[in-house]
Amino acid sequence: ANTNRTRDMVLSSLGIVTLLNPILGYKKCAEIAREGYQQNKSIHQIVVQEQTLLTQERWDELFCFENLIHPHFQNE
């Protein structure tokens, strides 16, 4: 398996927004997912780069391989 390609596919999926529900709330995550779908943007682009809802460091912590497999939720 091509691990880089697989990682890119996971992180470009709109479904990963569900990992942010405990932090940002359902309504905000639904808005982010809708914007991503309608404007063909990644969740990362919206959350980190455009709306600065999370820092890059926090994003990396949440979306590391281990946390994607065994999520632990910590509100900011």
Image (cartoon, helix red, strand yellow):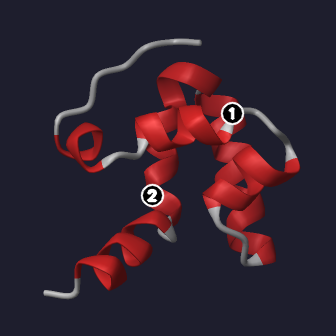
One can see residue 6 in this view: yes
- Residue 19 shows in the view: no
Q: Quadrant of the C terminus?
A: top right
The reply, left or right, for residue 49 in relation to residue 64 is: right
* Pick the front one: 62 or 28: 62
| Residue 56: quadrant of the picture | top right
Q: Give the residue at the far left of this rendering.
A: 1
Q: Residue at x 55, y 40 (%)?
A: 59
Front label number (1 vs 2): 1
Instruction: Give neighbour class at mark 2: few <14, some 14-19, many 20+ (Cα, 10 Å).
Output: few
Kind of residue at badge 2: Gly
Image height check: is 22 above or below 7?
A: above
- Per the image, label 2 sits on a secondary structure element best described as helix
SS type, badge 1:
loop
Report the amino acid beneath label 1. Answer: Leu
Position of residue 33 relative to residue 56, above or below, is below
Question: Are the two marked residues, 1 and 2, in contact with CB atoms closer than 8 angstroms?
Answer: no
Q: Position of residue 10 (x, y in %)?
A: 38, 68
**Mark 1–mark 2 distance (CA, rounded to whole Å):** 17 Å
Point 61% across, 24% down: residue: 25
Residue 14 percent location from the top left of the image: 53, 62
Residue lying furthest right? 50
Residue at the (17%, 35%) spot, across then down: 70
Residue at the spot of label 2 = 15
Mark 1 or mark 2: name the one nearer the start of the chain. 2
Q: Residue 54: give its label.
A: 1
Q: Residue 69 is drawn in which quadrant? A: top left
| Residue 14 sits above or below residue 58 on the image | below
- Residue 36 placed where, x, y %? 71, 65
